[in-house]
Image (spheres, grey):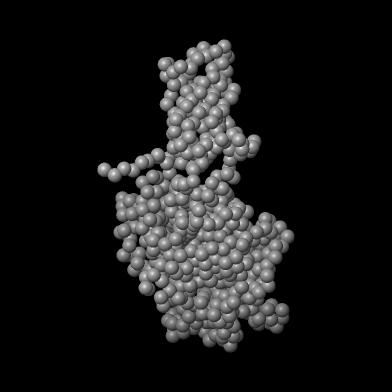
Amino acid sequence: MAEEKQKNEVLVEVEGVSKKFCKDLKTSLWYGVKDLWSNVGGNKQERQLRPKEFWAVKDISFQLRRGECIGLIGHNGAGKSTLLKMLNGLINPDAGKITMRGRVGALIELGAGFNPILTGRENIYNNGAILGFTRKEIEEKIEAIIAFAEIEEFIDMPVQHYSSGMKVRLGFGVAAQMEPDILIIDEVLAVGDLGFILKCFKTIDDILPKTAVVFVSHSMPMVSRVCSQIILMERGRAQFQGTEVSKAIDLYYNRFTNNESNEVFNDGSLELEHVELINANSDKVAPDTLLQLKWGDPLALKFSFKLPASKAIPKFSVIIFDKEQRPVAVFEKNTLNSPIRITGDRLVFKLHHPNLQLSKGVYSINISASDMHSGSPKLRINNVLSFQVLHEEEIWQPFLLKTTYESV
Amino acid sequence: MKHLKPLEKVYQKEQGLSFLRLIIDSLQDIYRSRFLSRQLAERDIKAQYRQSILGIFWAFVTPLATAFVWIFLRSSGTVELTDTGIPYPLFAFTGTLLWSIIIESVNSPITSTNSSKSILSKINFPKEALIVSGVYKVLFNSLFKFLLLLVFVFYFGVGFHPSLLLFPLGILVMVFVGNTIGLLITPIGMLYTDVAKAIKFGFQFLMYITPVVYAVSEKDGLMKTVMEWNPFTPLILTARSLAVGTSPEYLTYFWVVLACCVPLFLLGLVFYRISIPIFVERLSA
């Protein structure tokens, strides 16, 4: 029963929180002096926007229980970090109320309080003290921290000679020893090598069930991996809020729809005239919307090239990229035996794939051409075309593979 | 769930808290963060000396140089000073060294806070620790100044006397008063760099209306009135008297200054606590 209660307790409660910032430093400082004065007086009157101010965060509300994770996404300057600073108690809201129940751990800056001249070991104490550990706790944990950071060999070397990755590892090693009820994470995992990131994830996975996590990231795969609720912020407001994480991610991606193709390399021997997604759902295609395909549809692309000089058919490589610009698939390249022909100075061909199993999302296509024999590059164009794959299921993995289950 | 209760924190615009509550919170945070304050002080002191060969010597350079200048001015007859009652070099050395302790104490809260700007905007920790670590650092430097003064006291033939035992207390009071003043100006001083500059500038002049390198003038006049009103006068004079074993003048004023600084210090703590979020908001978005 007590456990049940503990599971359901609301650890973070944010009610109608707003924060304003000033665009001009001189004015901002003067407002600061005025705010100082009104804070001393208890600060009862409602705050309005003064000249040159804007709402950096406006009317955000949410609740977070133990074991839940909320993702804050939005483009740069949407107010995510400001909201985090308020949650962490670094700045006070201008309206609304934040209630935090329990110990708060913030992974906002790793290695805070490090002094570059001092050794790694000394800096573990500095950083640990700032994070709220006692000397005894640090002494108990120091070996675990050093082992986690994997820098036994360099622990007595000044931190200024550490590589940036080593500093981050040491910082995370200390932070990972926190046992918070509420964990605030802001983009810190973007640094470090792969092994380290995997380690961080393991640590976070371990503490996730015991804590309420507020997670700010620009990495949507990470967000969809850990978050159970999401707020998409836009100019300080919640543009979307709810538990449908992938819906918010789609909305986020749509803000960055970029239809500009971009010729990276061209030796002049061929020129792309036209590209077309033949079987796209074209009945409702307005100029601005994306070409749409259903999951499982065939995919057919029609390319038409002009070859002013050469008569040789190049080898084409067509690659599908996801919204994060990660290559997710490549089509088989054409060979000498492929039945495509040059007519006049044109090369027009169709590329066909029977059953597209990319998961729901937006993708773009890059094409490159190289000489069939020598392999020397002739042309490369990024983002010749983008399209959207429709499916009702929201998943974050790049492929949803057609599957049947049978009893054996 | 009892243990969770004190951990609940509410952040909102209104400070629904009474002055008394804020003072208590502040003092509690000072106690809670005692390890952090020590660690921060240790870090800064270690880092400072690890990168220096002359080390603590730099803490003495300015006051000793000022004293030497005045000793020279007086011995060469360039300036004529009222009789100080004790060997003049001892008078000058005690004056400038004690004065440097006051200046360091006044600057300490602003310096400590400003140097932690980057953590202030990232991590929530008891900010009072910065003040206390500043005090530790001042005390550390003062310890060496104190030892140096002891050497002077014996070198100039004053020798041991019981009031010498109270001398450290005189220094502690100076550190306390200096920190109180520093703490009260820190909220504005963090927003505007003008404040720190004005203090540096102002204290250069303040030294000349404080009995640092010459005694309070005996003739009635503007200088005497100003010097007698100056709250630093009783601090310097009392500490010096304790060091050299003369009877302290202005002892009443000394107690008045100390008594005023206790509530002012608490007030300063409250202002500081209230002003940190504003400082973070204005300067590290």
Q: Residue A92: where, in percent of width, then height?
A: 58, 66
- Foreground of the two, A148 or A251: A251
Q: Farthest residue toward the bottom?
A: B252
- Foreground of the two, A128 or B190: A128
Question: Which residue is pictured at 36% across the width and 68% down the height?
Answer: A135
- Foreground of the two, A274 or B37: A274
Q: Residue A103: where, in percent of width, then height?
A: 44, 68
In this orientation, does residue B114 appear? no
Question: Which residue is pictured at 53% across the width and 86% down the height?
Answer: B247
The quadrant where residue B110 appears: bottom right
Quick check: B79 left or right of A337? right
Q: Farthest residue toward the right?
A: A51
The quadrant where residue B54 appears: bottom left
In this orientation, does residue A272 appear? yes
Q: Residue B87: where, in percent of width, then height?
A: 53, 76
Question: Which residue is pictured at 45% across the width and 35% down the height?
Answer: A356
- Foreground of the two, B234 or B208: B234
- Dividing the image into 4 quarters, which one contains the N terminus of chain A? bottom left
Quick check: A192 left or right of A147? right
Question: Which residue is pictured at 49% across the width and 68% down the height?
Answer: A100
Q: Is residue A217 above or below residue A400?
A: below
